Image: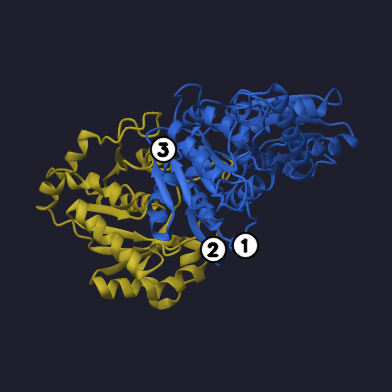
Chain colours: A yellow, B blue
Amino acid sequence: MKKINIVTGHYGSGKTEFAINYALKLKESHGSSVICDMDIVNPYFRTNDAVSFLKNEGVSVIAPEYANTNLDLPSLPSDIISVFSENSPPSVLDVGGDDDGAIALGQFYPYLSKEDYEMFFVINALRPDTSSADGIIKLIKDIEYVSRCKVTSLVNNTNLSYLSSVKDITDSISLIDEVSNLTGIKVKYISGKEDILSKLPEELKEKLFPLKLFMQLPFDAFA
Amino acid sequence: MSKVLMKGNEALAEAAIRAGCRHFFGYPITPQTEVSAYMAKKMPKIGGTFLQAESEVAAINMVYGAGGAGVRVMTSSSSPGISLKQEGISYIAGADVPCVIVNIVRGGPGLGGIQPAQSDYFQATKGGGHGDYHLVVLAPSSIQEMVDLTSDAFDIGDKYRCPVMIMGDGMLGQMMEPVEFKDADVSNLPEKTWATTGTGMKRKKNIINSLFLEASELEKLVLERQERYAEIAKNEVRYEAVDVEDADVVLVAYGTTSRIAKTAMAKAKEMGLKVGIIRPITLWPFPFEAFNNALNGKDKKFLCVEMSTGQMIEDVKLAVGDKAEVHFFGRTGGIVPTPKEILNKIIELGGAK
């Protein structure tokens, strides 16, 4: 695992769920981790929603001061810079959706260019704009262009929210493989709800990354 | 077509395009901006017009013009932006121009906040702009229903020559859900003989206008319009009623709040309480019939749940009259009620321990 882990993708790909789970995994393997909410695009449903859970789990959260308030201000917290210091624990940068969100990453290029970072691109093949190889590759290129960083791994997070099925994932495998072949970027993980992943064929097992879901709607849960 | 995962705002925009909307005029505002963003991306690719106007006032007047020329046209905004559009909406209603207006409601009054709310119910159903007019107001509770109602909104607008509003709260605009688009055939829509499409020197010119120099002429038209509203009230009322007949407590809620209410209702049933729900889908015309049906059976109490300090409750009271108690639970200012809070209120009314 790399020290700096950037999570990008189309909005609605499940980036934030993946980012939160990856931060928890880093915490487990390294004793501590940091997650940065760098989303300057979405007003609702963001890393900051899970902040108390993450802090309890020992994951530090760096989030815009005004996240989830009524101030719709696309500013980033200055302490993001701390993740590049030598003493920082491994970190996850949860970047906003699309190239619009990835613009916020560009300013860290001077630091990132000196780091051996991981940059995930999370794909949900059931989102209309990322349901074809052309659509996915265009978005990868757009995000790479504005962020000046290179995507290093693909994450297949194909899902239909509460209607997700095993078939959704198996149907997407050939498309994501095609993207991988055309771009030379490897598919590192297939992520999703644990009960669905456990039913996937044996040959995919080594790539599985089960997710605990955090972005709940108020009518989903009875707390 | 199979299901895809979409954000409410983009699904709404796609549904409008599939309903034959090729003209969109808007101005960005959270939490509705993705409607405009989606239209900006898609319209140029399909030969449509997307225009980001200089203001909401300009956008609604562009809608007025395009609708008057007979095309399917939409605009969208959120609460403060909808307030700005009211003058244009009144003119559109006064000129009998069909169009679709989307309000993805946020906290108010004033600039309020960007979190979800339902506090524009009065504005949407009781006028908003000046004059004797109504908007047909559709209130979906899921993204699928929002997609289906978008297509209906254009049909209703064309059929009765009136502006139609789709009202969702910020959550409905921002959340993601699986959705399926049913391909409607919009290639053969009825001709709009009243529209300003050019006379071709073959007919008298059509005029789109809301100014009348003779009071008697204006009164005649306003009364004719009232007859059309009566037709709408007769034909277009929509609601969902679940387990109402046997209920001790009937919840009344619309939009995403109805889904939170249903979660509370399921829990209450587990506890042995008899709870039902009436979910208005058309906020205007209001589904009075659902309440008449509910009042025919045994005695019950009504609990209106809203993301406001109580606006729809006035229509609920009008529907119920003195035949039953009407209670209220609401959160406002961008706070979403929890199922637990609603359950507590049900228990309080239902008398269970």
The percent coordinates of residue B120 (x first, y second) are 58, 29
The correct choice, above or below, for A216 with respect to A126 in the image is: above
Q: Are marks 1 and 3 on the same chain?
A: yes
Confirm whether residue A53 shows in the render: no
Kind of residue at badge 3: Tyr
- Pointer 3 residue: B27
In this rendering, would B127 be left or right of A149? right
Q: What is the distance, in whole Å, between disc 1 and disc 2 at their CAs?
A: 26 Å
A105 and A210: which is toward the camera: A105
Instruction: Measure how far apart labels 2 and 3 are at the Cα level.
Output: 30 Å
**Marker count (numbered):** 3
Which residue position holds label 2? Answer: B3
Q: Chain of mark 1?
A: B
Q: Residue reaching furthest front?
A: B201
Chain ID at mark 2: B
- Mark 1 sits on what residue? B188
Q: Nearer the viewer, residue A21 or A57?
A: A21
- Among the two numbered marks 1 and 2 on one chain, the one whose residue lies closer to the N terminus: 2
